[in-house]
Image (cartoon, coloured by chain):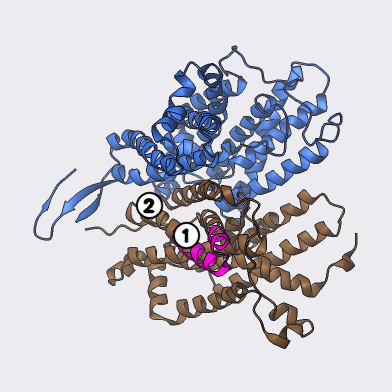
Chain colours: A brown, B blue
Amino acid sequence: MDFGSINPVILIASLMVAATPILLAAIGELVVEKAGVLNLGVEGMMITGAVAGFAVAVTTQNPYLGMLAAIVAGALVSMLFAVLTQILMANQVASGLALTLFGLGFSALLGQSYVGIVPPRTPKLDFGPLTDLPVVGPILFNHDILVYVSIALVAAVWYWLNYSRGGRVLRAVGENHDSAHALGYKVTRVRILSIAFGGACAGLGGAYLSLVRVPQWTEGMTAGAGWIALALVVFASWRPWRALAGAYLFGGIMVLQLNLQAAGFRIPVEYLAMSPYIITILVLVIMSSNRARRSMAAPGSLGRSFHAAG
Amino acid sequence: MLRLEKRPSPSKLWNYATPVVAVLLTMIAGGILFMALGKNPFEAIKLIFWDPLFSEQFASYSRPQLLIKAGPLILIAVGLSVGFRAGIWNIGAEGQYIIGALCAAAVALAFYPAESWLVFPLMIIAGAAGGWAWAMVPAILKTRFNTNEILVSLLMVYIAEKLLAAAATGFMRNPQGSGFPGSRNIHNYASASNQELIANTGMHWGVVAALIAVIFTYVLLQRHILGFHVQLAGQAPRAARFAGVAPARLVLMCLGLSGAFAGMAGMFEVAGPARLITIDFNAGYGFTAIIVAFLGRLHPVGIVLAGLLLALTYIGGELAQFMLNLPAAAIQVFQGMLLFFLLALDVLSNYRVRLSFPSRSSEVV
């Protein structure tokens, strides 16, 4: 094998691309969990976004319309979960699972006629001469728009959660829904809106997979990305910037693993392909083992149903 | 305006009625889906739910398939239901099923071609142990490091799938298979073969094991202190602690039991209907079993009925695929919808729906 064939600059540039889908999904889920809702349907919403974005992009030959469609599709399908858990008081774990199982089937059904088609190319943003700078150019100034959007979204979520009235209401709802309700905040409304935001982000992340990262549509193509995004939220201790760092760490592992496969590393491909999942588990163990820190970080009402009495 | 009022205890009537209503609603919604796909909804529904059992043309082939498909679903679901009752979520049964099959196949291939009555029981033990060990990873991480068992058990599915691929193309590949992926045909190896016990019924050892598991679980839940602890931990975790329930032991027990059952299901499948280890050996039974467990109301007897019904959707789905050119994914959507309706209707057993007006309120239900 040949380590020389792995170029660190290209590695960093491509890990940002690899990280973007899970970062988008994770930042959405982070907001949902901050509002006290555990939506395990991320995988289902991502793959719905992936197929909806792909179909619209192929039909209109415009990747941006595809991404828009993915946002709408992700938000719409998340409303199934919202109705079940917020209005009909169903168990959140089971409803999230149902959303994932349904999303996987539904996307396979919609995507049948799109297998083997090449989507329209998503152009990279034009930074003029900046792109040609050594090292910095390929890493910072040679990406498509969604890489920058995902980073901007992290910044926006961080600012909004910490420094805006709306963000504080959302956190209050997530920490203790009974107190928030007593203060007159609309717990159910805040939560439904958060779920929609999470769905939109997951949908966009899915579209990034099918339109840019792969780019192709195949059944079940998210391959656990939604679950890794869920783990990422725990890893990040529910903090947006840590989610960014975590996503890039995972992106790095995924890209490195693919590079090792390509470089003919003397391990069968299947074992290398396990590594993102194994590392996700290891990271979960490390982050969860400190009980005190974990219970401080997790929103107080996470996963509990809210029913206003009277 | 409609208003929900929490019932002091869940309604018995709705508890039994919701699965039936959910199935009916799914049939209606499914019919609309099939219509959207350009198929005759009545024909499709009849093909899925009626023809596999009663049509002269298909029943002779389809009827035995019912037990073949229901066996693993029931065996896995009945194991999962114990954990679900206690609020312990093993959603990685698919992975435990794969590992069970791999361990059982390893035993069979190690003894091949020696003939002995010992091989088959050893394979059952290996399958159960494999599934158990795979489930112990999330269990031990949960009890030692407080790691979320939902995420870990699910992520372990992906690892198991990669391991399956490595086995089928690498270390378990048939040395006489001219380089094609896949192991030796275990079904054709007499000592390891999981044969049909009564001709043309689909009855094999896996179905027997599923029935034993159902009875075992029923007794466990109804008559044993462990079953009581499971119920208590699910309904009142704080009270359970005061009653002396050790949460860690409960996690190990629930995940271990469901893992062992799923592993056994994998064993019977690889030695029987699947015949050998292939890359796409797992058919999603581990995930469908979650739907089976909920549809059966987490009750062993209910799970038997739910397992038969979902087995029917698998067979009927294949038939509809063949006869109407209905896409395979349509059945997956159908199963997903069933779970949605079931969860949605649960509101009726836990809450009373009341119609309330600003000035006066009147009861509707």
Magenta stretch contains residue A68: yes
Residue B125 at least partly seen? yes
- Mark 2 Cα-neighbour bin, 10 Å: few <14, some 14–19, many ≥20: many
Residue tagged by mark 2? A84
| Residue carrying label 1 | A73
The structure residue drawn at horizontal position 68% and vertical position 31%, both measured from the top left corner, is B127
Most prominent secondary structure in the magenta stretch?
helix
Q: Name the amino acid type tagged 1.
A: Ala
Q: In which quarter of the image is residue B203?
A: top right
Q: Nearer the viewer, residue A25 or B105?
A: A25
**Label 1: few (<14), some (14–19) or many (≥20) C-alpha neighbours in 10 Å:** many
Rendering coords of residue A122 (x, y %): 63, 69
- In the rendered image, residue A159 lying in the magenta stretch gets the answer no
**SS at mark 2 in the image:** helix
Of the pair B209 and B188, the residue shown nearer to us: B188
Query: Spatial distance from mark 1 to mark 2, Cα to Cα?
Result: 18 Å
Q: Which residue is drawn at 27% across and 71% down?
A: A184
Amino acid at the residue labelled 2:
Leu
- In the rendered view, tell whether residue A53 sits above or below residue B274: below
